[in-house]
Image: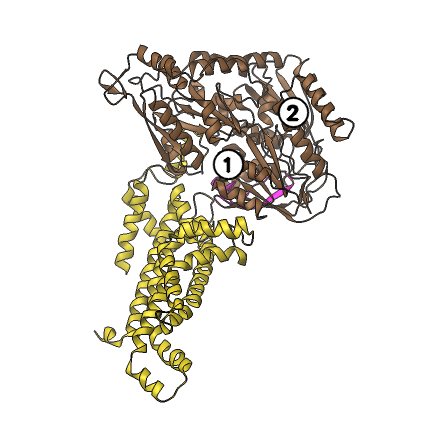
Amino acid sequence: MLLILLISSVVIFYALRSAPGGPSGGGVLSPLSSQEVRQAYEKRLGLDQPVYTQYFIYIGHLVRGDLGTSLVNGSPIVELLATHARNSLVLGFTALVISYVIAIPLGVLAAVKRNTWVDQLAMGGAILGMGIPNFWLALILVYFFSLRLGWLPSAGCCDPPQLIMPALVLAAEGTAVTMRMTRSSMLEHLRDDFVRALRAKGLPEWQVIIRHVLRNALIPVISLTGLRLGWLVGYALIVETIFRWPGVGYLLVDSVLRRDYPVAQFFSLLLILFVLLANWLADIGYGLANPRIRVA
Amino acid sequence: MSERSSQMAVHSLVSQYLDGGLSRRQFVKGTLALGLSMTTIGALLAACTNSSTNTSATPKRGGTLKEGYDLDFSRLDPINTNWYDPAFYAVYESLVTNDAQGNYVPQIAESWNVSSDGLKATFKIRSGLKFQSGAPLNAAAIKAVYDGIADPKNGSPLGSIWVPVASTEAPDDTTLIINLKHPYFDLFNIVKTGYWDIVNMAFRAQLGDKYGQQGVDGSGPFTLTEWVPGSHTTVKRWENYPGTVTPFIQNKGKPYLDGINWLAILDAPQRAIQIQNGEIDTLRGPAFQDISRLQSDSNLTVTKLKEWSGYFFSLNFKRTDLGFDTVNVRQALSHAIDRASIVQALLFTHGEPLYGPITSADKSYTKDVEQFNQFDVNKSKSMLSDAGWKAGSDGILVKNGKRFQFEMIIQAESFNQQLGSVIQAQLKAVGVDLKVSSLDRGTFFNKAFANPDSVMFFYLWPVPIDVVTLFVNSVNANGKGPNWGNAVVPQVDAAIAAWQSAGNEDQLNAAGKQFQLACAEQLPFVPVINRDAFWVSRKRVHGWQPDQWNLYPYYNDVWLD
């Protein structure tokens, strides 16, 4: 994991500096400032030094716990981390909750009512959820719920009504995937011998489904959560930007556009770390779901 | 009738109309008799309507105004900012400002006079003023700001505008003297802008690069709470605000609002949605396609004003292989631009073609520029042919084996991209192959200084000639300033010198005309279009009055139902 982080840090550092432009054009200086003023500013930031020197200085600061400050608004990165990470966690957690609250009951219902209109409706919804690009879904929701009905704010942070649409959009694909996985897992377990045995014992059907089949069927769904966290990070970049939700994704996109190097570097690395941790959690989840994987 | 007396007459008519002494018909007849155009009269009526509806009830204290803004936020540092945002009108004050009729009225200075030889402007500063930090705001503090702008160490890009100023003096706390190298009638036009807002220079030095980001120290009625570019700027009421003497501001004491929250809404269609949905109270710059929808919404008031700024593109004089250093070639390209159809198609008629360097919003505007740069494809082709360019097999012009091909950089924004595409198509019709490169902000301004073939730009400034001089003055070529086309045109430089040495109104007007004609004919850049400025407010907002002469409304009178 450390090696991946190290390689990523080099790639990010060089990629940012290879991109055209620089911090002096990103809004820190007046666009009317002369070339001389721009060069003096970039020299003050040490950007006139070779990239590898800049990299080692940066890593040295990171190791000492100095995350730096934003070039654009002068805020320490620690402060940006506190506010934006919190916003992203709130959004991500809400999306996950929405996703499971919708997906699991519908997945169970679709499995139990297999090949009925309920199943077809639920699976049709799942296909739509997976097929609709989230930026398009966002526009549709804004059109209906903000412009037509006036029920929800179209953007911004951080009142609960402002959370609803971004969380729904962020949850959409995950809900669809989880619904389909719950359904297929349920169908698999509904054919198991222990289910026949439980029914033969005269256990009420709802108890068979909820207490026994669902408990088993949920194991792969739970293990998928780790992977879903990684996907959420990717989608958050888009959803937070569309809804101007000031999370880590929004900040990262903005900082890259402004060439705010310290912010872009740190938050790119943070997201990579998050995805690595999420994958690690997914491995653990698989291990829990199937002990043979853990033994192997 | 002189400009001044004409303004006074308009002022008087507006006052009578607002007081109910004149009917709408009488008002229109009176203003027409003064020579105002119907567009200006319409703008005045809109402002009056706004004013009358917004001041009829008893003001209430409290609440936070949420204002949508169509641009990203610039650093809140007058001396080094991209452009000045609405928050400048809340946290800072200038020596003088403009009322709704364009007259200079007191703000920090309570009175002023100019010596008979025009070489000395003396301002009487209000006594007992303080900055928000508690530091004294006196003549010495103002002198420090003006000297700071002139000092190259501060890197202010505005230094070339301040050239006529020889020195400043602060003999006592309430007297500020500006000594001029030569009479400079335009001085007031300069010091009224946000770039000359008064900032506590000691505090600025203390914060260094973080000034305008993490803190500001002005004397306006609000103090900065948070500045987050790309997202929002928030201010709260300054409880120790000593009040204002500016005549048109009715609330002379502390502001009614608890605070203001400006939201950068860079996605154009979203602005209209947010104001209609009640997420914001006021808005600057809705998308043009949304204007009629907003106008038909009974919850909203839409005010239309003329915009000070125009779109233009430069042609790099160093591209001698393409002939950009030749006026005939520049004129040929300009004749290929169908400005009227751009206004029709992209602005939904909410704007006007631009034939010279400044827009018709400015009192210096001369219609004589309209003899230049008219759309004429045949003339364009003929001029290019005379310059030795012949159509190649694919229709693109060729000369000495060189294709007529160049790149224009634009800032990535939906309207810029649309405009870039239209210019591209129109130039192609005369055999010019234009590549439009849409660049993000971090890249655009760096590349603008890296000798690009062409830069398309939209400036924001309420005194157009002064800012346009920055883009065309030869002293700002070759990376020394924003003359990105490296234009060196002696006629233009001469006109700038005349403008900067005009000692009275007549001389200033003559120099302004000279400058416009020189630019329109010689084309140090190619003017394209001017869009109208639209402001929208919800009915719950009172006392919010955008006007033609200030970039943004003042917030002291604003209150919410």
Considering only vertical position in the picture, is B205 above or below A218?
Answer: above
Badge 1: few (under 14), some or many (20 or more) residues near its Cα, within 10 Å?
some
Image point (36%, 53%), residue name = A62
Residue A213 lies in the magenta stretch: no
Q: Which residue is mark 2?
A: B41
Q: Is residue B99 visible?
A: no
Mark-to-mark CA distance, 2 and 1: 24 Å
**Chain where mark 2 sits:** B
* Residue B321, quarter of the rendered image: top left
Side of A293 where A257 appears, left or right: right
Q: Position of residue A21 (x, y in %)?
A: 35, 36
Chain A drawn colour: yellow
Chain shown brown: that is B
Query: Could you tell which of marks 2 and 1 lies nearer the N-terminus?
Result: 2
Residue B348 left/right relative to B561: left
> Residue A132: x, y in percent?
38, 53
Callout 1: chain: B
Q: Residues within 10 Å of mark 2 (few under 14, many from 20)?
A: some
Mark linked to residue B214: none
Compared to residue B388, the image places residue B44 above or below, namely below
Q: Which residue is mark 1?
A: B289
Give the secondary structure at mark 1.
helix
SS at circle 2: helix
Stretch of the chain drawn in magenta: B209-230
User: Extreme right residue here?
Assistant: B21
Q: Is residue A6 left or right of residue B220?
A: left
- As drawn, which residue projects farthest toward the front? A116
Q: Nearer the viewer, mark 2 or mark 1?
A: 1
